Image (cartoon, rainbow, N blue to C red):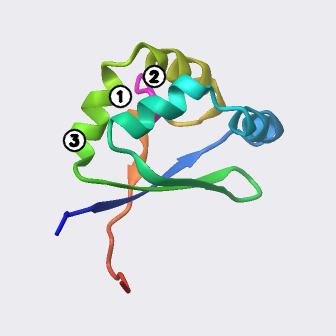
């Protein structure tokens, strides 16, 4: 049995940039998609609420390993740099470091 960690997180997209944010995610770079797959980000979805609340969900064998793997990818550095201006409240963190992870309190398998 393979253990899977389910990760759900929140970010806030700037309301004035919602249309552009949606457009960027209709055309995610192929090498970024491959890097995510190769580093353990599976079943990855983003949900966007009117007003900019972004809910992300993915499954991974290890969040720490998945994040560390992406941190070593040049494509991720470029993607995070381009995406950072879309978000509020990140400070000096990249979006893939500054998300608010939610606690899982229930799961129906």
Residue sitting at x 63%, y 54%: 53
With respect to residue 39, does 107 lie above or below?
A: below
Is 68 situated left or right of 36 in this image? Answer: left
How far apart, in angstroms, are the residues tagged by discs 3 and 2? 16 Å
Give yes or no for contact between labels 1 and 2 (Cβ–Cβ under 8 Å). Answer: yes
With respect to residue 70, does 75 lie above or below?
A: above
Give yes or no for contact between labels 3 and 1 (Cβ–Cβ under 8 Å). Answer: no
Residue sitting at x 51%, y 24%: 80
Residue sitting at x 36%, y 35%: 38
Relative image position of residue 64 (x, y in whole percent): 22, 41
Secondary structure state at the residue bearing disc 3: helix
Which is nearer the eye, 44 or 31? 31
Q: For residue 83, which quarter of the picture? A: top right
Q: For residue 36, which quarter of the picture? A: top left
The magenta stretch spans residue 43? no
Secondary structure state at the residue bearing disc 2: helix
Identify the mark nearer the N-term, 1 or 2. Answer: 1
With respect to residue 73, does 22 lie above or below?
A: below
Residue sitting at x 38%, y 86%: 108
Residue range in magenta is 91-95
The residue at which mark 3 appears reads as: 64
How far apart, in angstroms, are the residues tagged by discs 1 and 2? 6 Å
Relative image position of residue 58 (x, y in whole percent): 43, 55
Which is nearer the eye, 76 or 15? 76
Q: Which mark is residue 76?
A: 2
Identify the mark nearer the N-term, 3 or 1. Answer: 3
The residue at which mark 1 appears reads as: 70
């Amino acid at each position: 049995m393979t253990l899977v960690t389910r990760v759900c997180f929140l970010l806030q997209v700037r309301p004035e940039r919602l249309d552009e944010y949606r457009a960027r995610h209709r055309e995610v770079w192929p090498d970024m998609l491959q890097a995510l797959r190769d580093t353990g980000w599976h079943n990855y979805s983003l949900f966007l609420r009117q007003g900019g609340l972004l809910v992300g969900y993915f499954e991974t064998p290890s969040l720490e390993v998945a994040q560390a793997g992406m941190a070593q990818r040049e494509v991720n550095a470029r993607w995070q740099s381009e995406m950072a201006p879309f978000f509020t409240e990140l400070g000096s963190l990249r979006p893939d470091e500054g998300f608010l992870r939610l606690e899982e309190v229930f799961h129906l398998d």
